[in-house]
Image (cartoon, rainbow, N blue to C red):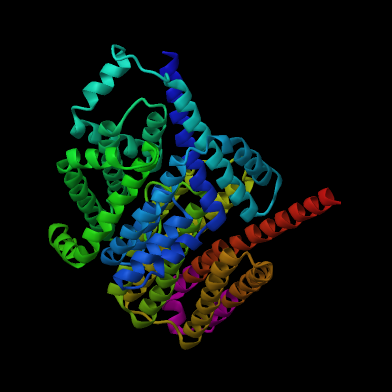
Amino acid sequence: MAMLLTIAGGVALLIFAVRFLRKGLDRLFGERLGLWLQRAGTGRGRAFGTGLGVSVLAPSSTTISLLAVQSVQSGHMTARQMLSVMLGANIGMTVMVQLVALELDVMSPVLILIGVILYQYTRQPRSRGIGQILLSLGLIFLAMALIKSAVPTTIEPESDLAQIIGIAENYPVMLMIIAAIVAMVTQSSTATIGLVIGLISAEAVGYPVAVPAVLGANVGLAITTLLIGWRRIESRRLAFGNLALKVIVALLGLAMLPLLLRVLDASPGPMTTQIAMLHTAFNVVLALIGLPLVGLLTAMLERIVPAPEPGSTFGPKYINVAPAEGTKLAMGQSLREIMHVAEIVRSMFDDIWRALKKNDEALARQVARRDDEIDLLDGEIKRFLTRLAPDDNEPGDSHERMRQLRYLSELETIGDIIDKNISELVIKKIKKGVSFSAEGAKELDEFHKRIAENLLIADTAFTTRDRDLAQQLLRHKEQINRHEQELRDRHFSRLTSGLRPSHETSSVHLDLLTHLKRVNSAVTHVAYAVLEDTKHDDDDLSVRSDTAE
């Protein structure tokens, strides 16, 4: 019982270390990994090389899978391009397993010591990221040592463990399925194969168990990618293509299992190194088979997984239901999605005014329906952000999450004002068949342009946290409030002078002023948040300076 608990503890530490490693990679590289992937180009060779290079720098299967799916969903790359990237990334990710196989247990205290110093006692994101990666590697090696220490150095042939292993060796397909499930649950092929290597190091299992486990771990990771990318057609095609290729290679491995076992038995070097090399060889064979077939495979997938009817595929471009492990990477994606919402809001604000000026009722109704898109994205982004695991060591992450949620709420409010108020006023004016006076129409148009300008300033201030732009927004708010009252007074003057168009459109005119002013109020709320952020940063910098002195 104690042995099983110790092995379970070692596995738990291994899973945690791999997850912690992913967060360290996120802290070190942030959004740059996604940008590097998106620059892969259209050529299969260049895309393959890009995937290989990025995954060597960030040997995290879940991180690469998430980035691949996000790049396809956002439209930056097609499934065909990203499949070539994934074939290269599959090879690069085996670097971590190669490190695990080196059995650097003796290095774990040194790595943990250096990692804790850099991660806990430095302030720069880069140094903290390096520290977190070193600490993660130390914990991985420590977990391997823990697993090895739990298994007896000699296993009696009559023992229960020996009998279980003996039975398992006769069912390679079942072993492969179990390994695939473990890889899906842990969301890491590295953790799964690392567990196998730990058991090999303790001489608890041999090649008959380890080889099917390696095959299954690779298939399990492909299933994880499929689950992540299921919601969008292009990412689903990518995941199906990746899974199909891995299943083909795994089945070939099973068919050649007796030959593989003989080759491995005859090969020089430790068994742990041979298993790590087998993992790399699996993905090299995968690339050799897959790269020439990328075009044919994606063409087949386009028929098997057809595109839905036009207009039915709207959804988030930059986020997934399951957030990325790295908080900064995930928040970078949510920030881009919020700016996607901001683009829709600005387009609604411009189009509803065009509908007003051209008396286009169809356009006004289409603009109103666009608010459903904002509501959909609003819900998806909120679910995405609220599912992010808080990092107690990064209080700024919680602050950034609240900042994004607040601005998203303001954008959703503006969408509602356009949908439920301004659109209805435009349709009301069109149905009445009335027109504003020339002077009134000109005043409203200028008022709309000033608020549209503030919308753009607010988006820029939000993304850049520019204090000057925030102060400019506040100045504009005061000017807009005064100007709105002036426009009301001018309208009342035209009414008292008996101008007929002013009488016919009075209620619409005054309500438009009210709702345009409401839009501007929501827009300028970002200014207070930016000024609060910059004040917080100044205070934090002052505290750090005092501490340094």
Image-quadrant location for residue 527: bottom right
Q: Is residue 33 left or right of residue 473?
A: left
Does the image show residue 51?
Answer: yes
Q: Is residue 420 left or right of residue 177?
A: right
Does the image show residue 180?
Answer: no
Residue 338 position, x and y percent, is 46, 60
Query: Looking at the image, which is closer to me, 41 or 535?
Result: 41
Query: Looking at the image, which is closer to me, 490 or 149?
Result: 149
Q: Give the residue at the far bottom of this rendering.
A: 438
Residue 112 position, x and y percent, is 61, 38
Residue 136 among those drawn in magenta: no
**Quadrant location of the N terminus in the rendered image:** top left
Q: Which residues make up the magenta segment?
A: 488-511
Q: Give the residue at the far right of this rendering.
A: 549
Query: Looking at the image, which is closer to me, 466 or 350?
Result: 466
Query: Looking at the image, which is closer to me, 3 or 443?
Result: 3
Residue sitting at x 49%, y 27%: 146
Residue sitting at x 34%, y 65%: 48
